[in-house]
Structure formats: C-alpha cells, structure tokens
C-alpha cells in the first residue's frame, strides 16, 4: 500500500508540474512528503552509501508515478487542460485552499509565537505575484525555435531548465511558469511529445533540458534542506506565502495557454471541482495518517521485539 501511495504522490507531482501556475513542490508539501522528498534528493547527492541506497529506492518509487503522470500529461492531458482549464484551475484552487489550514495545523509548533516571521509570508506572496505578472499571455513569451538548435540556444535551454527545476521543488513557484516567461514551455512540451512518439530529431533538446534539471537540483536541494532544518519557522511562513501567491497564478493560468483564455472569474469558477480538490486533499491526508500510524506501530513492535 505504501508503494501505491508513493506512486500517487509522484503522479500528482507530475500533473502539477505540467500545468503553468502550479508547482510539484506545492503538491509534495500539502501531501506531507516534502521533507522526505528533499531529504532523499540531498542524500542522493551527498549522503553516505546506505543513505544513497535508501534514497534511490524511495525516489525510484516516486519517479515511476511521476513518469506515468508526465507521459499522460504530455500525450493526453494537455488537451484536457486546454479544453477544461477552468475545471482544472478550480480543482487546484481547492487543493491549495484546503491544504493551507492543514499545513498550519501540522506545523503549529514552529509557527506559534513567531508571528513576526509573517514578513516571510509576504515575501513569498510577492515573489509568486512578480513571477505571475512577468508571465506572458498565450503561452508564447519570446520566440524560441528549438528546431534550429545551436550552441547559444543549447546554453539558454540548459540555464532556463536549472532555474525552472529550482522553482518546481519550491512550493508555490511554478517551474512551468518560468518556462513560459523564458519562451520554452511550448517548445519543450512539443519536443517531449515528439521524442515520446519516437521522433529522435528532438532528443538533443530533451537531453540538454534534462542535464539542466539535474544541475539545478544539485545546486538548490542542499540549500532548501538546510533552511528547513535551521530556519524552519521562517521557511514554513515563506512556503505558506508561496502557496497563497500561487492562487493568483492559478486564476491567471488560462491566459498562459497556447490559445489564451480570460482569467478565471466567478462565472467560470466551478464549485464542484473546487470541493473535489478539497475532498482529494482530505482523503490523501487521511491515507497519509493511516500509513504513518501503521509505521509507528511497526516500529514499536520491532523495538519491543528487540527488548
């Protein structure tokens, strides 16, 4: 069952990462496995042999779900996002709004009595709003022709991938929105689709993008882990700000499509999907607590067995 939960977690992350306005890091945080995810990446980079093996096993399970979600998003779900963007946006609004109080309750020990740290919440909101305001309408941004790959364009794709993946692992900041701003969201999605349909002419672009992602992970993961360990209160307040700010990005999400749509308003808001988002979050939270309780019981039994 735990394997299934890891697959679901990875799947949800991939779906979020593929939609401008939503971050896979947000999904990881609100589903309660963000610390474990960051810790596993850090162990993979700089851990001891035993830690690396444990991290590989966990990330492999998570990666299977993520890969399935990514393939479905690229091949099939992209069209659903285009044709049902307001339902999808309402769903993600439900995710975020229902998740915020859950996170506050779970992190109340580091939040309580440190209300001056709310300045970090305001900073988080400001960062996401700034990124959202920079995001171009229509998903076009600057014109980037990846069909004519050259050295300069390769370096550009590599650097943008580094920045985008750094954003993707931070709750609230959408890596897809970064790609939109830099003009390579549509080209990269198109390149991935071509490679998945065995058109290997776009494989060099995908490889360069992948190398940029790996480099970005190596550069940013240790910093995030240290912040969560040494400055957890400030980090959680900031993450809450990033999540609150992401509400604006989700509302503006329809304007970033290939064929731009108006930003979501009360008329295009779907209450049923909003509630569904909340139900999913509460359901996954319940499932998480179930697995956590089973793990605690198992550890107690093992400890008693040793004694």
Image (tube, rainbow, N blue to C red):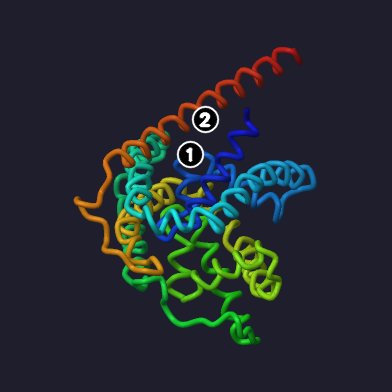
Q: Can you say which quadrant of the picture contains the N terminus?
A: top right
Q: How crowded is mark 2: few (under 14 residues within 10 Å), some or many (20 or more)?
A: some
Instruction: Return the x and y of residue 147 as percentages of the image width and height.
Output: 60, 81
* Residue 62 percent location from the top left of the image: 63, 44
Q: Residue visible at 32% across and 47% down?
A: 90
Q: How far apart are marks 1 and 2 (CA)?
A: 8 Å
Query: In the orientation shown, which residue stands out farthest toward the right?
Result: 49
- Residue 8, above or below 19: above
Q: Which residue corresponds to the image point at 47% horizontal and 32% vertical from the top-left?
A: 284
Asked whether the residues under the numbered discs 1 and 2 touch, taking CB atoms below 8 Å apart as contact, a structural biologist would say yes
* Residue 15 placement, left or right of 100: right
**Which numbered circle lies on residue 31?**
1
For the question of whether residue 117 can be seen, the reply is no
Q: In terms of secondary structure, where does tag 2 sit?
A: helix
Q: Is mark 1 on a helix, strand or loop?
A: loop
**Residue that mark 2 sits on:** 288
Which residue occupies the foreground of this view, 19 or 76? Answer: 76
Residue located 49% across and 70% down the image: 186
Q: Which residue is drawn at 56% across and 39% down?
A: 8
Q: Which of the two residues, 305 or 148, is positioned nearer the viewer here?
A: 148
């Amino acid at each position: 069952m735990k394997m299934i939960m890891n697959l679901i977690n990875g799947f949800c992350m991939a779906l979020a990462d593929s939609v401008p306005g939503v971050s896979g890091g947000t999904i990881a945080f609100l589903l309660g496995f963000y610390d474990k995810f960051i810790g596993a990446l850090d162990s993979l980079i700089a851990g001891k042999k035993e830690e690396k093996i444990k991290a590989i096993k966990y990330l492999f399970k998570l990666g299977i779900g993520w890969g399935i979600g990514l393939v479905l998003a690229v091949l099939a779900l992209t069209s659903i996002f285009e044709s049902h963007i307001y339902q999808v946006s309402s769903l993600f609004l439900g995710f975020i709004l229902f998740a915020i109080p859950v996170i506050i309750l779970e992190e109340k020990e580091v939040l309580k009595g440190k209300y001056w740290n709310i300045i970090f919440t305001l900073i988080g909101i400001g960062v996401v709003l700034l990124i959202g305001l920079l995001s171009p309408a229509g998903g076009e941004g600057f014109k980037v022709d990846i069909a004519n790959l050259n050295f300069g364009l390769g370096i550009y794709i590599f650097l943008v991938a580094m920045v985008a993946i750094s954003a993707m692992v931070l709750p609230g900041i959408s890596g897809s929105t970064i790609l939109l701003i830099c003009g390579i969201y549509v080209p990269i999605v198109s390149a991935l689709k071509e490679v998945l349909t065995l058109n290997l002419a776009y494989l060099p672009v995908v490889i360069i993008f992948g190398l940029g992602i790996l480099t970005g992970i190596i550069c940013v993961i240790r910093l995030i882990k240290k912040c969560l360990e040494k400055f957890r209160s400030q980090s959680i307040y900031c993450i809450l700000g990033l999540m609150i700010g992401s509400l604006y990005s989700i509302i503006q999400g329809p304007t970033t499509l290939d064929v731009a749509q108006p930003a979501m308003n009360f008329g295009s808001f779907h209450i049923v999907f909003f509630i569904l988002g909340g139900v999913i979050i509460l359901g996954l939270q319940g499932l998480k607590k179930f697995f956590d309780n089973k793990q605690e019981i198992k550890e107690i039994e093992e400890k008693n067995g040793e004694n």
